[in-house]
């Protein structure tokens, strides 16, 4: 029997490479997983007060359906974070709690994208943005980011057309770890406002910034149609618990139709996980002392991998300012046909699993993504293997 044509538009390179890894696993050899950004799979564990809140919710039988829009107490706490701490004007009615940021992105794209619409993405971009836009009949266009992490505003303006619907930002960026400046964000908001475009801004890594302060888009949103995506997976180490949220700028009347309709999608899927929402509320309102510890560990690991990679002839990368990804450039030079072949051959030769850069869009071509979450001894061992692999091809 046939499946829909639109399912063929869905790709997710980060997990697609696992198909090759499963074949390698059959050999019984060790795999070093540098492909998925899941800190909880390494030595970053969910804080005890969050786990305690989850266990307590179950012990008290708070595992029934809650409001489709999200538990009221959690929505209020999200408003406090995003409005009071980061500047986005919100009321609880502007917040939709979702089962992870991915569900929120799905609901947003499903609510605004129609056949023929164009969505602008930073190149390279996080793959679900492309997949969801295409699934709902849209197309994507990548805009360039300079080496210093600032967006090419002329490129954005050049690529806006009568079919353009939204500009997306992931800040800090996945896969490059770049962090957008206040000036860059304001310029993008201004361009969107001038062209009647939505701004979809993903700030899931907002607390994982190393060398400078983080600028939330709420500080320059004013009355622009800014849609914020955020969640608890990365900052609060709740990856498998799946809790995220969508926020719609309260000052924007352009968002009123979305505000009135997106909650239909929430109601049709019943509700987000209630015990996890209780744990997420505890995350926002409880101790935050795990954050500086996590950021310091990640910064040390970033510096290690950055130094090691740039010492390998044939590889080159810039230093990420946030998140936990490195995106090295590969000198392919008749050694490999493309970055996918590089990644597969690296896996089969060394057991080091990474992700091909072309899986993050055309502007990711010729790169590969490394996650620097493992302990330093594992990272050093992985870098040793990568170094030998590249030298053997010289």
Image (cartoon, rainbow, N blue to C red):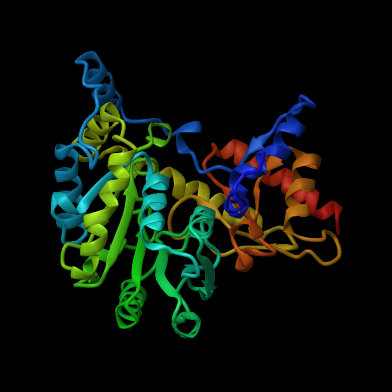
- 197 on left or right of 19: left
Q: Is residue 145 visible?
A: yes
146 w.r.t. 366: above or below: below
- Seen from the viewer's position, the closer of residues 76 and 303 is 76
Indicate the position of residue 208 as horizontal and vertical percent values: 38, 51
Q: Please state the horizontal and vertical placement of residue 331, each as a whole percent of the image.
A: 75, 65
Displayed quadrant of residue 16: top right
Q: Which quadrant of the figure has residue 225?
A: bottom left
Above or below, 104 against 197 in this view is above
Name the residue rendered at 50%, 64% in the picture: 138
| Quadrant that contains the C terminus | bottom right
Q: Which residue lies furthest to the top in this view?
A: 59
| Residue 252 is at least partly visible in this image | no
Above or below — where is 329 with respect to 58? below
State which quarter of the image contains the N terminus. top right
Q: Which of 137 and 186 is in front in this view?
A: 137
Residue at 73% over, 54% down: 340
Q: Is residue 304 left or right of residue 329?
A: left
Which residue is found at the position 24% from the left and 38% from the top? Answer: 68
Classify 261 as above or below 237: below
Residue 196: image location, x then y, percent: 32, 77
Q: Is residue 385 left or right of residue 83?
A: right
Residue at the spot x=31%, y=72% of the render? 182
Residue occupying the far front of the picture: 1
- Answer with left or right where residue 140 lies relative to residue 194: right
Image location (x, y in percent) of residue 358: 66, 60
> Which residue is more in the foreground, 202 or 173?
202
């Amino acid at each position: 029997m046939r499946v829909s044509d639109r399912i063929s538009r869905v790709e997710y390179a980060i997990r697609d490479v696992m198909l090759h890894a499963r074949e390698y696993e059959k050999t019984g050899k060790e795999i070093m997983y540098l492909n998925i950004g899941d800190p909880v799979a390494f030595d970053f564990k969910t804080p005890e007060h969050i786990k305690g809140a989850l266990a307590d919710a179950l012990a008290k039988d708070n595992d029934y359906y809650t409001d489709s829009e999200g538990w009221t107490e959690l929505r209020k706490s999200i408003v406090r974070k995003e409005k009071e701490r980061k500047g986005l004007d919100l009321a609880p009615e502007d917040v939709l709690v979702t089962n992870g940021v991915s569900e929120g992105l799905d609901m947003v794209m499903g609510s605004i994208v129609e056949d023929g619409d164009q969505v602008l993405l930073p190149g390279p971009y996080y793959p679900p943005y492309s997949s969801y836009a295409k699934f709902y009949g849209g197309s994507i266009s990548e805009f360039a980011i300079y080496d210093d992490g600032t967006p090419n505003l002329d490129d954005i303006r050049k690529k806006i057309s009568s079919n353009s619907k939204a500009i997306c930002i992931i800040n800090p960026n996945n896969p490059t770890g770049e962090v957008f400046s206040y000036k860059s964000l304001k310029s993008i908001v201004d361009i969107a406002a001038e062209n009647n475009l939505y701004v979809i801004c993903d700030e899931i890594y907002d607390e994982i910034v190393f060398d400078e302060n983080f600028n939330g888009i709420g500080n320059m949103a004013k009355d622009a149609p800014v849609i914020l995506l955020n969640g608890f997976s990365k900052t609060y180490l709740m990856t498998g618990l799946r809790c995220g949220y969508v926020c719609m700028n309260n000052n924007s009347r352009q968002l009123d139709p979305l505000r009135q309709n997106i909650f239909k999608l929430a109601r049709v899927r019943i509700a987000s996980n209630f015990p996890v929402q209780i744990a997420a509320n505890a995350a926002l309102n409880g101790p935050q002392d795990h954050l500086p510890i996590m950021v310091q560990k990640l910064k040390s690991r970033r510096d290690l991998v950055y130094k090691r990679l740039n010492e390998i002839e044939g590889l080159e990368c810039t230093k990420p300012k946030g998140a936990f990804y490195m995106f090295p450039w590969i000198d392919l030079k008749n050694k490999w046909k493309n970055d996918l072949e590089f990644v597969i051959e690296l896996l089969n030769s060394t057991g080091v699993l990474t992700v091909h850069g072309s899986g993050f869009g055309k502007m990711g071509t010729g790169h590969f993504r490394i996650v620097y979450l493992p302990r330093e001894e594992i990272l050093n061992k992985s870098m040793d293997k990568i170094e030998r692999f590249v030298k053997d091809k010289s």
